[in-house]
Amino acid sequence: MTTVQGSARPATTNPASVGPSVLSSPASLLGPEVGQSGSASGSVGQAAGPAAAGGSPQGLVTSAKTVRENETAGQSLDLDTLFAPTFPTRDDLSEAAGTFAKVAPWGALRVTPYALDGFLARRGIGHEGPRPRIVIAPGVVRLEAPDLAKRERSMERHADDQTLTAKLDGPELKRYLDAVHGWKRDDDDQVVEVEKFDGTPAEWMRRDKGETSLTGREVFEWSRKSRARMILRMAELDWAPLFEIPGRIPAMVTLTYPGEWESVAGDGKEVKRHLVTFLKRYERAWGGRIVGVWKLEFQRRGAPHFHILMVPPHGSAGALERELHAIRTAEWKSAKQAGLDAGRRPYRRAPLGDALSFPTWLSLVWADVVDHQDPEERRKHEAAGTGIDYAEGMKASDPKRLAMYFAKHGSYAAKEYQHEVPDLWKRPGKGPGRFWGYWGIEVATVAVEVDWEMYLLTSRTMRRWAARTRIWDPKLNEGKGGHRWVKAVRTVRVPRGVNPETGVIKMRNVTRPIQRMTRVSGFLCVNNGPEFAKVLSRLQTLT
């Protein structure tokens, strides 16, 4: 059965000051169906004693973790207090872009004196070379200098590839199909098995001419570049569709595999097929596609599992289909009573999990999708194969927190095993492919071209800002506490020496400064991209 984790204890609650807390399900916040199945834990602590019996305690209460004095401890909290997301909109991006001075766009026409006869000639600015610009997104500000002329030539080559694909016929088409099936014919037209070609016909034709290699690239690990790309893309997404229904909060949904997982997840493609099947089942049961992000990880035993950040649906599975079936049945009865040819009576076959709440439906359907053949493994998988954690989902309150939290495992060496592909998958054609993705969300960015002087000044400013971090200091403001900026550092393990007797390398922890924006171009993940861009636009007065 799906385990439902409750909402996290807010920062305004102090267990040391209000006494023991009583754990309750989050049904009062998330709807009655959430608390009907599974176990609930970690919800908001309800004070015992005078605070629970009557009036809530007022005054300053010191937090046990941050030593900060809290003026709202013990007071009642509503959903807006527990979860108040702040995600910039597309209008905020356009407003921030408008604060930068405009430069002539690439490809624009300008009037210049002609060198020979003094006449004026209209010439294009679409020159070769990079064009500096600032890209603003909900949770990131990025500096880049793309070569638009080079990009235009790449698009022309892509168009040529489409034309090249249409020219495959006769012997070339036969050789391409043989390569796709992993066949190679010798001089006697006998088939010999070789590695299958996984690519487009245009790629194969270039390979056939000796321009590219036959083998494709298999993904067996989650590299640092892949993590950086994921953080960048998560911070660039427009998260409005995820929170379009007021009063709903996101949750981290986990889909795991049975104890004996090798027989049902023999390779990465099989696991991805399970995920696609689950998406189709969800759409049919709840009347819409999942909106959210997903990530593939691995347990220490090698078993894969998925994390999905989404807003769990309310109500029961198949409610929309049942309502539509009732309408069609009523229309059929009315037509039959009127003496019309109503045809066959509408029929609806209830799918697996129909009329169940989301936690119960999730456990039942995911176990059916994986479909382990051992009855005992199937029973255990249905009982403990899924999880819904609202406390984890509520941590995604702005673009930066969402992006960094979803990639949190990539920041800790102790969790690095979660990105190590099992040996069973480390074979050609057995890899998992992509480790992450998103559904129902689009990228929202606005690019502003600037001159090189402004670009370099912005780069230096962002690099210096990234070298500092803000921490809470309880000694400031006469003991009341406050934030102050310090150098951003990280702890790394470095070799200290070698034990001469055992040959074991000794390691020690050292503190090193965090280096970001080490090059002129790059990006910074921030809580509010448009507001940060507005601050950077004030640098124009210095250029």
Image (cartoon, rainbow, N blue to C red):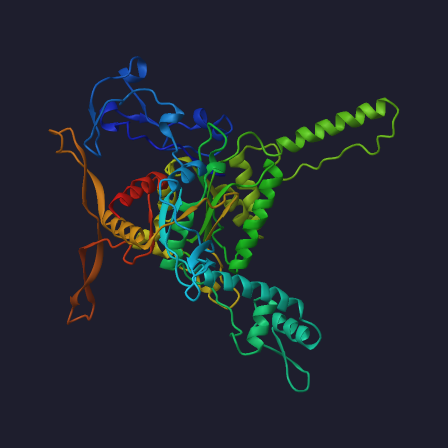
Q: Residue at x 20, y 62 (%)?
A: 494
The residue sitting at the bottom extreme is 187
Q: Residue at x 55, y 75 (%)?
A: 207
Find residue 434 and report its horizontal and vertical position in percent: 48, 56
Q: Is residue 361 left or right of residue 220?
A: right
Q: Residue at x 48, y 65 (%)?
A: 218
Between 198 and 201, the residue placed more toward the observer is 201
Find residue 342 and report its horizontal and vertical position in percent: 84, 30
When the figure is inspected, residue 52 is found, relative to residue 534, above or below; the finding is above
Q: Is residue 291 left or right of residue 355?
A: left
Quarter of the view holding residue 163: bottom right
Q: Is residue 283 left or right of residue 62?
A: right
Find residue 79 and report its horizontal and vertical position in percent: 40, 26
Between 43 and 193, the residue placed more toward the observer is 193
The residue sitting at the top extreme is 54
Q: Residue at x 51, y 28 (%)?
A: 33
Is residue 341 at all visible to an observer of this figure?
Answer: yes
When the figure is inspected, residue 158 is found, relative to residue 261, above or below; the finding is below
Quarter of the view holding residue 298: bottom left
When the figure is inspected, residue 476 is found, relative to residue 431, above or below; the finding is above
Is residue 264 at all visible to an observer of this figure?
Answer: no
